[in-house]
Image (cartoon, grey):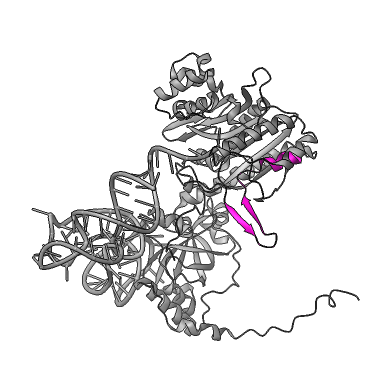
RNA sequence: GAGCCGUUAGCUCAGUCGGUAGAGCAUCUGCCUUUUAAGCAGAGGGUCGCUGGUUCGAUCCCAGCACGGCUCACCA
């Protein structure tokens, strides 16, 4: 048996039905939601087909982008332009000004916009007729010579015109554009075509993700992928989405965090790992919450939370410089300076200042409960001093922290996976980075004592039994991994969407997620 | 889940103290071979989100529903 033919018998020659057989359904030129403009465009489409013009060909290859034409020609004088090589360009038509026997077309491609001039005496009759059928929104290709118009705009004098994709629906208005937020999210493709700022934001998002990868990879971190479908959803306090695997007949959960898997990898000797991808939390939606969002988590053996503060300062300030060109960003009416160093403040001190009580009183359960109720915070019978301190922090302090601030020394009750502070076991070696009132990063020295970890899981189990649906479930395999020995390690999670919001000035997470979650359009 | 606000032409928006609705752009027709939101002349285009109620009459008032926005709750 030689070759692959035996294992992979040749398929019988495929005989596809002739194209014309597909077009039967096209003979009815209207669709249910058609309006006047779509009907007109469908008629043009039919007329082109009747003339033998394929309105959706794929044999045109541009040899320059709009940006390349500008880069090459913007500085040239008339004589030099006349000597420049002709170009083939393609893109979506975003503007048309017709003068009867000539006209101007603006198209845009991934690099920008460029103008084309079409004149009857420079085009074949067929190409000029085709130009006359073009609509704003069509995708077209042009060949021709660069020149400069009377008003100085670099333009291609077309000697050929191709329709590459007929648009049957009109684009939104050229001046006011598309504003309707619902349409922008549901039809992001239209939003991207007509709103340059939207394109800018998603390019910046891509730069953030590339920059994060580069930063960690340069520091010898290994990028890994761990299960999105997990039998035990751990690593964060959140409710998961449930799904079911038929063949195994088990329920699986979309992960709420990759944390426990990543630390298993550190046990395995991958001493520096990171994962940059989606997590899923079954929560309400808001300007700061989408049910699926992008998380960066990274873990480094032989490091502490203090090391990660330094790393985070370097990472985010250099990222801001790479993505925006500077370390200061405008957000929500504030100028936020990301150049390090950033203040490091124990949570209890911040709360003591805002609540105007001595810090040591906040260590006493009854005292902190009194402060909390005075501030209108509900005090449940099970709420510990640490829980109440956390609630006070969120209510009084977090919204007021505009400039980047590391909030340190979290209560152990809030941190079931973090290492206890050596000097005070009521606290853990953890920090959150708060910027513009939002949590951007959360990091801690990892709990690697398997017995302490088991006790923390037990505590979570009790909370769960008491009705806390977000308490973390026991994970025996994770404990087994810890029993093999997790090196002393520090780990961090960064909410990438919120980071992109910060760097782009977006006040809603939906502005930095291409397809944010919305209710289905028509409840079927 | 709660409160407030919104939904009118393809798009952006006016408007009707209840009497079958307008503008700009876009579309269509005519003119126009260097325009820049091109220009000039003319024309067409509407289930006023959906359902019900009040009323002689509802796009407008009332109720319910749908979708969206903001705030809160939930949520690190």
Q: How many marks?
A: 0
Answer whether residue A145 is magenta in the image: no
- Is residue A318 in view? no
Q: Nearer the viewer, residue A310 or A68?
A: A310
Side (left or right) of A69 relative to A152:
right
Image coordinates for residue A22, horizontal then vertical, percent: 54, 83
Q: Is residue A37 above or below residue B14?
A: below
Q: Quadrant of residue A421?
A: top right
- Is residue A260 in view? yes
Q: Nearer the viewer, residue B62 or A155?
A: B62
The quarter of the rendered structure image containing the N terminus of chain A is: bottom right
The quarter of the rendered structure image containing the C terminus of chain A is: bottom left
Q: Quadrant of residue A423?
A: top right
Region of the chain picked out in magenta, as a range: A241-265
Q: Nearer the viewer, residue A282 or A353?
A: A282
Image coordinates for residue A26, horizontal then vertical, percent: 47, 81
Side (left or right) of A268 relative to A345:
right
Image coordinates for residue A79, horizontal then vertical, percent: 53, 57
Image coordinates for residue A244, horizontal then vertical, percent: 62, 58
Answer whether residue A261 is magenta in the image: yes
Side (left or right) of A493 relative to B7:
right
Q: Nearer the viewer, residue A171 or A367?
A: A367
């Amino acid at each position: 048996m030689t070759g692959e033919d035996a294992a992979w018998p040749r398929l019988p020659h495929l005989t596809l039905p002739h194209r014309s057989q597909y077009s039967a359904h096209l003979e009815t030129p209207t669709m249910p939601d058609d309006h006047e403009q779509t009907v007109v465009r469908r008629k043009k489409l039919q007329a082109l087909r009747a003339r033998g013009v394929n309105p959706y060909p794929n044999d045109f290859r541009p040899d320059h982008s709009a940006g390349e034409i500008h880069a090459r020609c913007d500085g040239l004088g008339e004589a030099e332009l006349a000597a420049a090589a002709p170009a083939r360009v393609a893109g979506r038509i975003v503007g048309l000004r017709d003068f009867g026997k000539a006209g101007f077309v603006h198209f845009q491609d991934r690099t920008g916009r460029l103008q084309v001039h079409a004149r009857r005496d420079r085009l074949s009759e067929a190409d000029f007729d085709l130009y006359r059928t073009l609509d704003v929104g069509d995708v077209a290709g042009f060949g021709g010579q660069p020149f400069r118009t009377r008003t100085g705009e670099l333009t291609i004098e077309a000697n050929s015109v191709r329709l590459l994709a007929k648009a049957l629906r009109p684009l939104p208005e050229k001046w006011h554009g598309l504003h309707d937020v619902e349409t922008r999210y549901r039809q992001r493709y239209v939003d991207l075509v007509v709103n340059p700022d939207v394109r800018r934001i998603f390019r910046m998002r891509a730069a953030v993700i590339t920059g994060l990868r580069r930063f960690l990879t340069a520091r010898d971190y290994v990028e890994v992928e761990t299960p999105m479908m997990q039998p035990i959803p751990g690593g964060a306090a959140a409710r998961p989405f449930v799904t079911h695997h038929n063949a195994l007949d088990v329920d699986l959960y979309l992960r709420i965090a990759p944390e426990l898997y990543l630390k298993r990898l550190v046990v395995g000797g991958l001493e520096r790992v990171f994962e940059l991808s989606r997590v899923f939390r079954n929560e309400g939606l808001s300007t700061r919450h989408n049910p699926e969002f992008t998380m960066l988590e990274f873990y480094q053996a032989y490091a502490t939370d203090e090391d990660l503060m330094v790393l985070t300062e370097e990472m985010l300030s250099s990222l801001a410089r790479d993505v925006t060109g500077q370390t200061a960003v405008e957000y929500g009416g504030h100028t936020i300076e990301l150049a390090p160093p950033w203040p490091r403040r124990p949570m209890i001190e911040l709360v003591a200042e805002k609540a105007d009580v001595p810090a040591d009183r906040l260590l006493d359960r009854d005292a902190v409960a009194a402060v909390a109720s005075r501030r209108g915070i509900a005090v449940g019978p099970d709420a510990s001093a640490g829980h109440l301190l956390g609630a006070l922090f969120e209510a009084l302090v977090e919204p007021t922290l505009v400039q980047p601030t590391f909030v340190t020394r979290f209560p152990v009750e809030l941190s079931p996976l973090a290492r206890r502070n050596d000097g005070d076991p009521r606290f853990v070696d953890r920090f959150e980075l708060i910027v513009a009132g939002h949590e951007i990063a959360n990091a801690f020295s990892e709990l690697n004592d398997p017995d302490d970890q088991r006790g923390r899981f037990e505590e979570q189990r009790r909370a769960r039994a008491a009705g806390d649906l977000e308490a973390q479930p026991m994970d025996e395999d994770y404990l087994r991994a810890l029993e093999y020995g997790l090196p002393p390690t520090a780990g961090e999670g960064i909410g990438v969407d919120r980071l992109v919001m910060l760097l782009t000035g977006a006040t809603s997470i939906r502005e930095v997620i291409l397809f944010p979650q919305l209710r289905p359009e028509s409840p079927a």
